[in-house]
Image (spheres, rainbow, N blue to C red):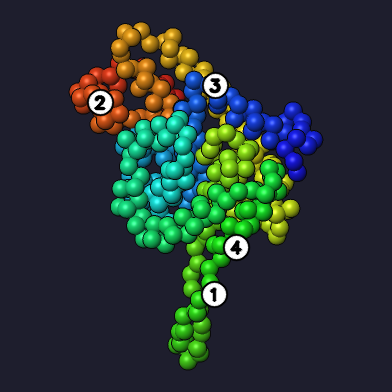
Amino acid sequence: MIRTESLRVDDGLLLLGRLDGRLQTSSCADIFLARSRLEGAAALAGLAGVPIVMRDLQEWIAGRTPPPRASEGLNDPISVAAIFHLALSAGDDLKDPLARATLNVLRTVLDDRTEAEAYGAEDLAHFGTMWRQLRTAADAPFPSGDLLAVADRIFELFALTEPATPSGFDVVSIDGRALNLPPPERDRTWLIAAAVPRMLYRAGFTTKVIPALVLMPKFLPSSPIDLLPTLVQAIRRTAQAGLRDLDSIERAASRIKTGLAVTKRSKAPLLARLQLCYPGLQPNAVSRLLGITPQGARKLLASLPQPSRPMLI
């Protein structure tokens, strides 16, 4: 399926191109990419068997809660902190200055590396080597610039994640029967999904890495050809949602410009833009981000209009 073949108004690749083109000129591209990073991380967590929503990540980043599900006593296969760290690491070595700037802002508020070590050190040891191997393989040149080449690469990466067949555990039941139990396995498909936005960028479908484009189903079909319709549908759905989100962000940003009566030197407009990505930022985070005192951060937060909340009656 070549990108210029049978394009329709609602074609997923056409919508993706429209979104990518708008990000080249939009003054809100930084906000969009920051939110896209959170959307992608939440989608990866769902694929890894740890269902969360973007709001859970925003609460953690804002300093209101520990990592999602970390304090709930759940027997999750992997910690959200480890997933989040590996998702952010997907773009660590990219040269896009805008993506780098948004990542630096996020890490000023929340150091994902420290959080992953604190909450998911065992997960990093288990998945880290495989993740680095997959990222290197995902960056290899593509033989052609079509979606089938991306689907083929996904299956190549899936083959790399297949663990060697280890011996099971020999146990003896209470009635004397000898049993061989297979070792527990942890799903690794989400690691491949984390590399899909990068592969779309390397294959020329986008000029920036758009982190929300994880696209992958939880279970792969039998062949790359069978995977194509799923990728096309996921691209259409994600691009449509991205265009709507970008429209909403641009409207909110325009209201910030016209709705705040502040001086030119005020940092209130910048903080209001940051809160579009990370609502509920605490004073200590604002102090680090804007280079002001904690007292100044509290005063600045108090000067911003508070979002309206529905009243229970």
Are there few (<14), some (14-19), or many (20+) residues within 10 Å of tag 1?
Answer: few
Q: Is residue 283 above or below residue 76?
A: above
Question: As shown in the figure, which amino acid type bears the numbered disc 4?
Answer: Ala
CA separation in Å, label 4 and label 3:
39 Å
Q: Earlier in the sequence, mark 4 or mark 3?
A: 3
Write down the residue under mark 2. Answer: 291
Q: Earlier in the sequence, mark 2 or mark 4?
A: 4
Are there few (<14), some (14-19), or many (20+) residues within 10 Å of tag 3?
Answer: few
Q: What residue appears at the point 52 percent right and 48 percent down from the top-left corner?
A: 194
Q: Earlier in the sequence, mark 2 or mark 1?
A: 1
Along the viewing direction, whichever of 27 and 279 lies nearer the viewer: 27
Q: Secondary structure at mark 3?
A: helix
Q: Secondary structure at mark 2?
A: loop
Instruction: Report whether 40 appears left or right of 7.
Output: left
Q: What residue appears at the point 48 percent right and 49 percent down from the top-left corner?
A: 45
Residue 283 image offset from top left, x and y in percent: 26, 28
Q: Quadrant of the C terminus?
A: top left
CA separation in Å, label 3 and label 2:
28 Å
Question: As shown in the figure, which amino acid type bears the numbered disc 2?
Answer: Gly
Q: Which mark is residue 190?
A: none
**Marks 1,4: beta carbons within 8 A:** no
Write down the residue under mark 3. Answer: 25
Question: As shown in the figure, which amino acid type bears the numbered disc 3?
Answer: Thr
Q: Secondary structure at mark 4?
A: helix
Write down the residue under mark 4. Answer: 159
Q: Is residue 190 above or below residue 295?
A: below
